[in-house]
Amino acid sequence: MSHYQQGIAPDVAKRELSQFLRMAEDIGLNVERQCRWLHMSADDRRRWVGILSDAPLPSQPELPLLLRRLAYLNNRLDRAKRPN
């Protein structure tokens, strides 16, 4: 595991994933659609959600890719929630 994956990145992943799950729940986004939006299988999603309970980081999708996806989706969901 690289220094990046042992350092701050897991904390960022936890924060971004938690934010995504909270906003997805707020808008009624079911697990199937979450998986589709994240471009991952239900098993991959389950493994990633496990990091919120201190499970080890999954290898797929790779952490940098997941962080980019989560940042994009969190931004889009946040913008959609704002009043015009």
Image: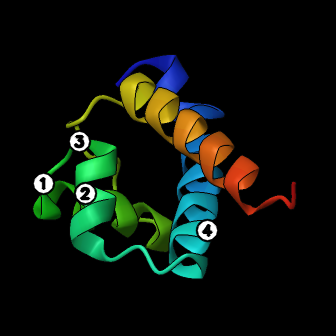
Mark 1 → mark 4, Cα distance in angstroms: 20 Å
Indicate whether 27 appears above or below 83. Answer: below
* Viewer-side residue, 32 vs 62: 32
- Dot 3 amino acid type: His
According to the image, label 4 marks what residue? 23
Image side of residue 23 versus residue 64, left or right? right
What is the residue that sits farthest to the right in this orientation?
Answer: 84
Q: Mark 1 points at which residue?
A: 41
Frontmost residue, 27 versus 31: 27
Q: Which mark is residue 39?
A: 3
- The earlier-in-sequence mark between 2 and 4 is 4
- Left or right, 24 with respect to 49, comes to right
Quarter of the view holding residue 39: top left
The residue positioned 52% from the left and 79% from the top of the image is: 25
Q: Which amino acid does label 1 sit on?
A: Ser
Residue 26: image x %, image y %?
61, 79
Q: Is residue 57 left or right of residue 41?
A: right
- Amino acid under label 2? Cys
Q: Distance between the residues labelled 3 and 1?
A: 7 Å
Image point (33%, 57%), residue name: 48
- Image quarter hosting the N terminus: top left
Task: Determine whether the residue tagged by mark 4 lies in a helix, strand or loop.
Answer: helix
Judged from this view, the residue extending furthest toward the front is: 84
Residue labelled with disc 2 = 35
- 36, above or below 29, in the image: above
